């Protein structure tokens, strides 16, 4: 079945990751720092993953998977290369839990797309597991199109939108001003301030 893109808050969800290799490391890196109720089950972990465990309040169980390990999990990330264990974890998973099968995208409920984040602005690139290399290439190309300065630009748009929405001008005028804001990216802080003054005079 095709999957749909979805933004979700996992801040207070229990996340269990079985595996301690590079893929587990990537999943933890993508979940931090917003998600910290993370349990990692693996006898060994990568050096960088160990650094993350030491830096953040993560739980590491240095052993192999056992029955009952996922009973309280809301999200289960299967990141081992043992097909038998992977299948067992799926069978043990509670019905409410979402499963991410790292090595077999079609075997899970959710996937982690390649992402670009600039503050509140996020882009996700997903190929359904068909070509992770293509997703990586597209991410690299888009990262040049949307530089780091977009983070401040998005914050500027957010503040401007609040000002416009709270004003007493007509809905049509609000729409026109909001459209004007995004006609071209204004990444220079000085130009942003100039536009801010120009628009606030119309409110």
Image (cartoon, grey):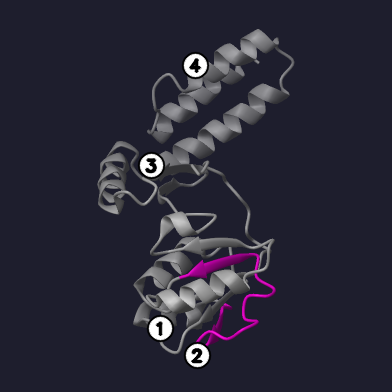
Q: Residue at x 49, y 22 (%)?
A: 181
Secondary structure of the residue carrying tag 4 is: helix
Residue 154 picture location, percent across and down: 49, 37
Answer few, some or many: residues within 10 Å of disc 1's Cα (few below 14, many 20 plus, some between 14 and 19): many
Which label's residue is closer to the chain start, 1 or 4? 1
Q: Of circles 1 and 4, which is in front?
A: 1
Residue 164 picture location, percent across and down: 64, 22
Q: Of circles 4 and 2, which is in front?
A: 2
Q: Mark 3 points at which residue?
A: 149
Name the disc covering residue 62, or none.
2
Q: Is residue 27 left or right of residue 39?
A: left
Work out whether residue 21 or residue 85 is closer to the camera in this orientation and state it.
85
Work out whether residue 133 or residue 150 is closer to the camera in this orientation and state it.
133
The magenta segment is 57-78
Q: Residue at x 71, y 20 (%)?
A: 167
Which label's residue is closer to the chain start, 3 or 4? 3
Q: Mark 1 points at which residue?
A: 45
Q: Residue at x 50, y 44 (%)?
A: 1
Name the chief secondary structure element in magenta: loop
Name the disc covering residue 180, or none.
4
Confirm whether residue 189 shows in the render. Answer: yes
**Against 172, is 41 above or below?**
below
Residue 93 picture location, percent across and down: 62, 70
Q: Do the residues labelled 2 and 1 touch (CB within 8 Å)?
A: yes
Q: Is residue 189 left or right of residue 159?
A: left
Name the disc covering residue 91, or none.
none
Secondary structure of the residue carrying tag 3 is: loop
């Amino acid at each position: 079945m095709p999957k749909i893109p979805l933004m979700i808050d996992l801040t207070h969800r229990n996340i269990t990751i079985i595996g301690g290799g590079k893929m587990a490391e990537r999943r933890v890196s993508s979940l931090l720092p917003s998600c910290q109720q993370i349990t990692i089950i693996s006898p060994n972990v990568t050096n960088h993953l160990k650094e993350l465990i030491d830096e953040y309040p993560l739980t590491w169980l240095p052993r192999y998977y056992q029955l009952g390990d996922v009973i309280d999990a809301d999200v289960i990330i299967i990141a081992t290369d043992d097909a038998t264990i992977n299948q067992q974890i799926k069978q043990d998973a509670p019905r409410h839990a979402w499963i991410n099968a790292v090595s077999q995208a079609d075997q899970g409920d959710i996937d982690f797309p390649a992402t670009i984040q600039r503050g509140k602005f996020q882009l996700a690139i997903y190929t359904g597991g068909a070509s992770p290399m293509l997703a990586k290439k597209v991410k690299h190309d888009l990262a040049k199109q949307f530089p780091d300065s977009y983070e401040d630009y998005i914050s500027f748009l957010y503040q401007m939108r609040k000002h416009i929405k709270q004003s007493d001008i007509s809905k049509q005028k609000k729409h026109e001003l909001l459209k004007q804001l995004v006609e071209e990216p204004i990444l220079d802080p000085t130009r942003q301030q100039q536009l801010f003054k120009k628009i606030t005079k119309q409110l």
